[in-house]
Image (cartoon, rainbow, N blue to C red):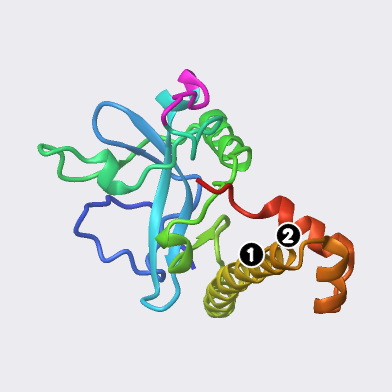
Amino acid sequence: MSTPTRALTENDRFSISDRSPIGSRYTDGEEEYTLVAYSVDPHSQTAFPLFIADADIAAGPNTHWYDRATMGSIDLLEVSDLLGIDDEALHPAAPDQDRTDAALAALASREEHTFRDTRDFSRVMLHGDLNTEEEVTAFLAYAKAELELRVAQRQLEKVSRERSEWIARVADLTGSQRRAARVLGLNQSTISRALRERPERP
């Protein structure tokens, strides 16, 4: 279950059993933020709060040419992103339903990364409050299974690329797609696709 909104520091344990409600408002004394989700590590049972800044919503989506991963999206911020050298904690701010709704809408419209970084294989996003211990237990079990699936999918993608490259190599050596299809026992369309998808040679 969620706990009442409380101050957050970088040294917080971020236990999944001690979460402020999603939609909670926070301030660093100057700017204000909405807690929109948690990044959960199901093995350590930690839940790292993620925020969207009011200022970022006012400024609009990221359009930096050098940041392709988040282009068209509002930045998601962790506690460490928000606290400077002189800032000790994020403190609860006054509720503001309009700004909370805007932040949650910005989260829902975020574009997915076109690649996975290392955190994608250790954390799962929690987008809504868990109201009972049973819900927490079920979510953690789901998150572990989701991470196992991501690892398996990454391995499958790797093996699939290697297979495709060797199909293309066989086609090169046999001199024709038709003969390669007969040798490998595959459809000719599979051979054609492997040739189209293989990396460009230097």
Q: Are marks 1 and 2 in contact (CB under 8 Å)?
A: yes
Quarter location, residue 132: bottom right
Q: Is residue 59 magenta?
A: yes
Count of residue discs: 2
Which disc, if any, is residue 194? 2
Q: Secondary structure at mark 2?
A: helix
Which disc, if any, is residue 127? none
CA–CA distance in space, label 1 to label 2: 7 Å
Amino acid type at image mark 2:
Ala
Q: Position of residue 143 (x, y in %)?
A: 54, 73
Mark 2 residue crowding within 10 angstroms, few (<14) / some (14–19) / many (20+): many
Amino acid type at image mark 1:
Glu
The residue positioned farthest toward the left in the image shown: 86
Q: Position of residue 148 (x, y in %)?
A: 55, 78
Q: Which residues are magenta?
A: 58-66
- Residue depicted at 81% across the width and 69% down the height: 180
Quarter location, residue 94: top left
- Between discs 1 and 2, the one toward the N terminus: 1
Q: Position of residue 141 (x, y in %)?
A: 56, 80
Q: Nearer the viewer, residue 187 or 125?
A: 187
Q: Is residue 76 left or right of residue 198?
A: left
